[in-house]
């Protein structure tokens, strides 16, 4: 499944609404059925972690602009609460936030069922996933997106949230995981 607001934009990117304005993603988003592109992201210890490190597990990528917004914080809390129910599944929470800020947020909130990772220096993620905001008020940050990847690294579900301030469809993402 792929949910989006349209196909106009920069370099075949998608259109989303961000703070009442049309914004465009940086390029084409990953598609259901394709192999999920590997990428590196940085953890709280400033170590690079690859998506391929989780091969053999189901992976939910919870991608969002910044933990400093209420909707982004809520998505991390929601996926944390639901991740404990999922077998052989890891939830990676990805944003441009610095790893220190992500770690502090998760520690203060007591969130142990998600893995916060920063893509602040991950050119491979930005290029391959195509969901960096290329214009608009949050230019440079990630659009709110959920990607479900199966144990073999194939993309099985995507949702690009059409209004950046809205929460993702948690139920649809979890159904996609349960269907694997």
Image (tube, grey):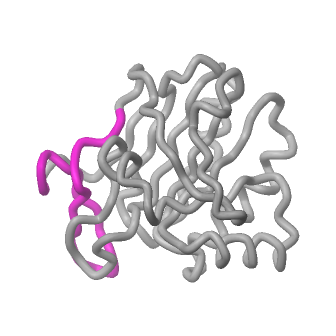
What residue is rendered at 59% in x and 58% in y? 42
Task: Inspect the magenta stretch and tell me whether residue 10 lies in it.
Answer: yes
Q: From what the image shows, is residue 88 above or below residue 84?
A: above
Residue 73 percent coordinates (x, y): 64, 72
Q: From what the image shows, is residue 90 above or below residue 100?
A: above
What residue is rendered at 73% in x and 76% in y? 105
Residue 133 percent coordinates (x, y): 29, 65
Q: Is residue 158 visible?
A: yes
* Res. 54 image quadrant: top right
Q: Is residue 175 visible?
A: no
Q: From what the image shows, is residue 164 above or below residue 153?
A: below
Looking at the rendered image, the quarter that the C terminus falls into is top right
Query: Could you say which is closer to the camera, residue 50 or residue 167?
Result: 50
Residue 167 percent coordinates (x, y): 54, 63
Residue 156 percent coordinates (x, y): 51, 26
Query: Could you say which is closer to the camera, residue 89 or residue 104?
Result: 104
Total marks placed: 0
Name the side, left or right, on which 110 lies relative to 93: right
What residue is rendered at 49% in x and 32% in y? 157
Give the magenta-colored segment's residue range.
9-30
Looking at the rendered image, the quarter that the N terminus falls into is top left
Name the side, left or right, on which 17 lies relative to 59: left
What residue is rendered at 77% in x and 70% in y? 106
Q: From what the image shows, is residue 119 above or below residue 4?
A: below
């Amino acid at each position: 499944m792929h949910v989006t607001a349209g196909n106009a934009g920069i370099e075949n990117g998608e259109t989303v609404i961000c703070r009442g304005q049309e914004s465009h993603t940086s390029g084409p988003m990953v598609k259901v059925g394709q192999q999920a592109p590997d990428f590196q992201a940085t953890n709280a210890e400033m170590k690079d972690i690859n998506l391929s490190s989780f091969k053999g597990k189901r992976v939910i990528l919870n991608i969002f602009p910044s933990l400093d917004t209420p909707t982004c914080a809520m998505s991390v809390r929601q996926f944390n609460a639901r991740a404990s129910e999922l077998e052989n599944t890891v939830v990676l929470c990805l944003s441009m936030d610095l790893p220190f800020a992500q770690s502090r947020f998760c520690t203060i909130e007591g969130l142990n069922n998600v893995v916060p990772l920063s893509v602040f220096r991950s050119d491979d993620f930005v290029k391959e996933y195509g969901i960096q905001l290329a214009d608009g008020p949050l230019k440079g940050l990630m659009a709110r997106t959920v990607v479900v990847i199966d144990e073999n690294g194939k993309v099985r579900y995507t949702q690009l949230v059409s209004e950046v301030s809205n929460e993702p469809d948690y139920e649809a993402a979890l159904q996609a995981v349960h269907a694997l």
